[in-house]
Image (cartoon, rainbow, N blue to C red):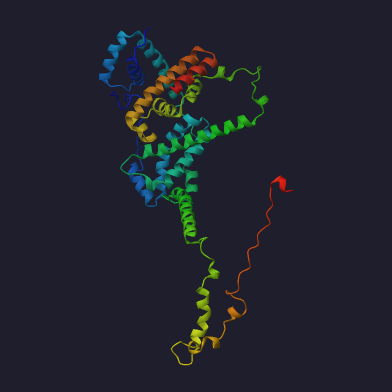
Amino acid sequence: MKVCMSKPDTDSTEIQPLVGGGSDARLVEEVRRGDREAFGHLVRRYEERLISVIMRFVRDRETARDLAQETLFRAYERLDQFDPSRRFGPWLFRIGVNLTLDHLRQRKRRIWTNLFSDSPADRVPDPATPDPRQALDLEQEVRAVLDVLPEKYRTVLVLRDLENFSTSEIAAIVNRREPTIRWRLAEARGLFQKVWLRRQQGKSAAAFDEGLSDDLEA
Amino acid sequence: MIWKPKCARYRLLLALEAGHDLDEQDHAELGCHVAQCPACREYRNQVQAGYRALEQAGRAGCSPDTGPSLWPGVKVALSVRQPGAPRELWVGWVPAVALAAACMFLIYIVHTGPSFDEPPRSLRPRQIQSAFEPFAEVAPQNVPGSVSDLPPSMRPVPHWVSDGGWNTPLEPVRRLPTYSTDPRSF
């Protein structure tokens, strides 16, 4: 299965070093020599995109900023492990995405703990309260569907279809081979389509969960 | 509509095609198949609808308000950190090294400890030699008139023999009384 490496140029937003401050490799070398201001150039170059990518996963802006800050700390500490022959951007985003996914896993565990610790009366929905899903706009609907997908599919979809990274960049970010990413992307889109369609058709929650669990297990 | 097994491959290609991730050759092959397969035609519409939703959601959140720059805060925090300090590597090494050291210490203790077959060190004849050493220093054996020249009956008796040293017979082991559990013995 041969596929193109990237989308057409019209919507491609590959990680490009901005003008000013020199190339990424040169800045990294200067940071390694002790020039902290050079790291400031790298931070300003990537922070906006980094926060944007993290916000696709966590939604809350302050949490995304905290995670982005921690990502930059870790990148600074591990700069000796960075291979200068490779691009700095995907390496930085790999740290950020892994950190974000770890954060989400921990949050999920906390939610489960709270669910089991709450009294059953607290979990019964109030019939007088309208279903909050009715108020979701398109973006929130998409996010709700993405949340249902397994993590490996959700990550690829977010990076490719929401953030427009190329498949080669995604391969570098998630540390997998590019054919694996393309295969995973195709499966992820197919799975998203199934869930999206069922959600749009307004099937009952039981049928939705039942069919979805079958798909995810397959 | 009839589902064909070979459609599975084309549906993966359709998913890639929706996001413009397919090359021209596969695109042409896919076009031929879709033209003959109504099920895949419908699937193409569904996949493209899903992709359009993703695309719109991506555009809606493409320029979020990320707030002020992180660099001032990062700069302050970095003042106490050094670049490239692999602290986390050490954190991973310490428990492993500590566990290995503890195992080696345990093995050493087990192999060098006294065996149950041997008497305790305090009862071994090494103490006898060490008890004679003061005499050997005072009167070497090759010097005329030394203790070794005296007949055995006239040799001085070491204190550990006279005051009940190792020659003193050990007290017999006291055995605890045993009780029969047979009810007929009561």
**Residue B114: x %, y % from top left:** 51, 62
The N terminus of chain A appears in which quarter of the rendering? Answer: top left
The C terminus of chain A appears in which quarter of the rendering? Answer: top left
Q: Is residue A44 above or below residue B119?
A: above
Report if residue B69 is visible in the image. no
Q: Residue furthest bottom?
A: B144
Q: Is residue A210 above or below residue A167?
A: above
**Residue A56: x %, y % from top left:** 47, 29
Rendered image quadrant of residue B56: top left
Report if residue A110 is visible in the image. yes
Q: Is residue B19 above or below residue B119?
A: above
Residue found 34% across the figure and 39% down from its top = A87
Residue found 40% across the figure and 42% down from its top = A42
**Residue B139: x %, y % from top left:** 49, 88
Q: Residue furthest top?
A: B1
Of residues A17 and B178, the one drawn nearer to the viewer in this rendering:
B178
